Image: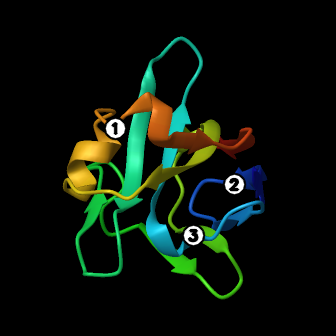
Amino acid sequence: QLQASGGGLVQSGGSLRLSCAVSGFSLESYGVGWFRQAPGKGREGVSCDRSRDGDIYYADSVTGRFIISRDDAKNTVYLQMNSLKPEDTAVYYCAAFLAPKRSSRYYCQGYGDPGSTFWGQGTQVTVSS
């Protein structure tokens, strides 16, 4: 089970830190990622980390502002979001990919095996102008 938290209402330029607590399995064998879906739009891969080998993907729209991290000891994934913009407003979802063998970009682009991908419930992030 993945439990996302940390969303809320923030002014433009502000920061939020999302957390995704995982229970029922160990993250050590999983890649992790954050996705978002804005009203009327499709799901977008924001950032993915397939393992701890330095292969981390960020969408162009968040590069330099967002940072994904993971604490396998706490079985938790984080997304630090800085310099938030109104266009970052969306429901944010965390995901875990079992035994990832492809690049982080691959998983963030939505090509991961649905049978090996686990999703958390969303957390709403609203950025006011």
User: Would you say the residues marked 3 and 1 are in contact, meaning their CB atoms lie under 8 Å apart?
Assistant: no
Q: How far apart are marks 3 and 1 (CA)?
A: 16 Å
Please give the residue where the numbered disc 1 appears in the rendered image: 112
Q: Which of marks 2 and 1 is nearer the N terminus?
A: 2
Element carrying mark 2: strand
Mark whose residue sits in front, 3 or 2 = 3
Q: What element carries label 1?
A: loop
Location of residue 93 in the rendering, given as x and y in whole percent from the top left corner: 61, 43
**Which element carries disc 3, helix, strand or loop?**
helix
Return the mark for residue 27. 3
Q: What residue type is labelled 2?
A: Gln
Whichever of callouts 3 and 2 sits on the residue coming sooner in the sequence is 2
| Label 1 environment density (alpha carbons within 10 Å; few <14, some 14–19, many ≥20) | some
Q: Residue at x 35, y 81 (%)?
A: 52
Q: What residue type is labelled 3?
A: Leu
Mark 1 is on which residue type? Gly
The tag on residue 11 is: 2
**Residue name at image x 19 percent, y 56 percent:** 103
- Is 23 placed left or right of 125 in the picture? right
From the viewer's perspective, is residue 58 above or below residue 55? Answer: above
58 relative position to 72: left or right: left
Q: Residue at 73% x, 54% y: name it.
A: 10
Q: Do the residues bearing badges 3 and 2 touch, measured as CB atoms within 8 Å?
A: no
Residue 82 seen in the current view: yes
- Label 3 crowding class (10 Å Cα cut-off): few <14, some 14-19, many 20+? many
Q: Tell me the CA gap for discs 3 and 2.
A: 33 Å
Q: Position of residue 117 (x, y in %)?
A: 50, 41
- Image location of residue 22, percent across then percent down: 72, 63
Frontmost residue, 77 versus 125 = 77
> In which image quadrant can residue 57 be found?
bottom left
